[in-house]
Amino acid sequence: MKSKVVPLRIPENLDELASLSAQEEHTDKATALRQWLHRGAAQYVLKLVSEGRISVGRAAELLDLTVYDIHRMAETQGVELGAIEEQRRRSRAVVERLV
Amino acid sequence: MLVRLIFDADGMIKLYRSGILAEVTQVFSCVITSTVLDEVVTKGKARLHQDAEAIGTIISDSVELVATKEYQELELGLGAGESSILDLLDREQDVLVVSDDRRFLSVLSARNIPYLTPANMVLVLAKRSILTEAEAEEALELLRPLIRTAAYWETREELRKEGERDEE
């Protein structure tokens, strides 16, 4: 996946925390900040899927992951994905066609 | 009327996780697009997801593969796999989409395209006596972590009623 440079102003306390995280994880501060950004993006994407604003497939594309990964993330974070009531009702109406 | 099933990645993976994908592909005529195959099997294997290998075997044994173009400009909040299915639906008749993806299902609803969730597929197999009541309950339990809580309880109740009908 391509990357781009984004000038970013962050509060000093977050900068300090990023330094601490980098030390603990044996990495550099920029990597620590990127990891935080990715975790936040993953949570936001899961919310979009749960709300029906993007599909699971699109979520996987946006995070450069697989559909399996999206399922696992939702499972571990307790985010419910899947058909809502109206959609389940439509699906249920189709069951008899296959019986 | 012969109905063909089209799986998206979400529906196919959930059917596999519930342990009924092989049964479904034996009972119904099933089709997937090459884009969905890539999402589920090729990328899944590349990222070492164990299910990808087994799903690939089931697909090669009993699912028709339809070649689709590459998707670069996507709309409607869908990914390449779901978009490839919309293209296929323009050419196919008497098909049902198997998916549990809220966004994709809303697009299908708007286009009046019928669909079935994986939980309801468990119910279909139970009603057709392809699964016993116990097997259907087990499949639903396996599916439980991947579906909404309400969907789990609704299907469980339907299976219970189905079991009562069988006893009568």
Image: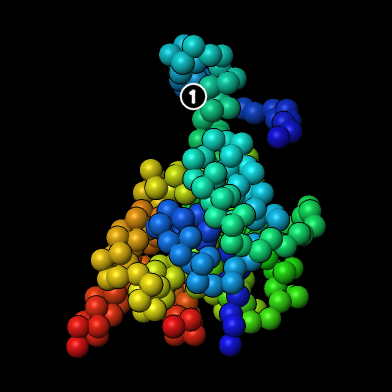
Q: Chain of mark 1?
A: A
Residue A17 against residue B111 in the figure, above or below = above
Q: Quadrant of the C terminus of chain A?
A: bottom left
* Left or right of B133, for residue B88: right
Q: Can I make out residue A84 in this image?
A: no
Residue B109, placed above or below residue A58:
below
Please name the residue shown 46% across and 55% down the image: B16
The residue lying toward the viewer, choosing from B131 and B35, is B131
Q: Position of residue A32 (x, y in %)?
A: 53, 22
Front residue of B38 and B19 = B19
Q: Position of residue A49 (x, y in %)?
A: 52, 56
Quadrant assignment, res B160: bottom left
Residue at 53% from the left image edge and 58% from the top image edge:
B12
Question: Which residue is painted at 43% across and 48% down in the image?
Answer: A74
- The residue that disc 1 covers is A14
Residue A75 visible in the displayed image: yes
* Mark 1 residue element: helix
Q: Quadrant of the N terminus of chain A?
A: top right
Q: In this figure, what is the number of numbered marks?
A: 1
* x and y, in percent, of residue A78 in the image: 36, 49
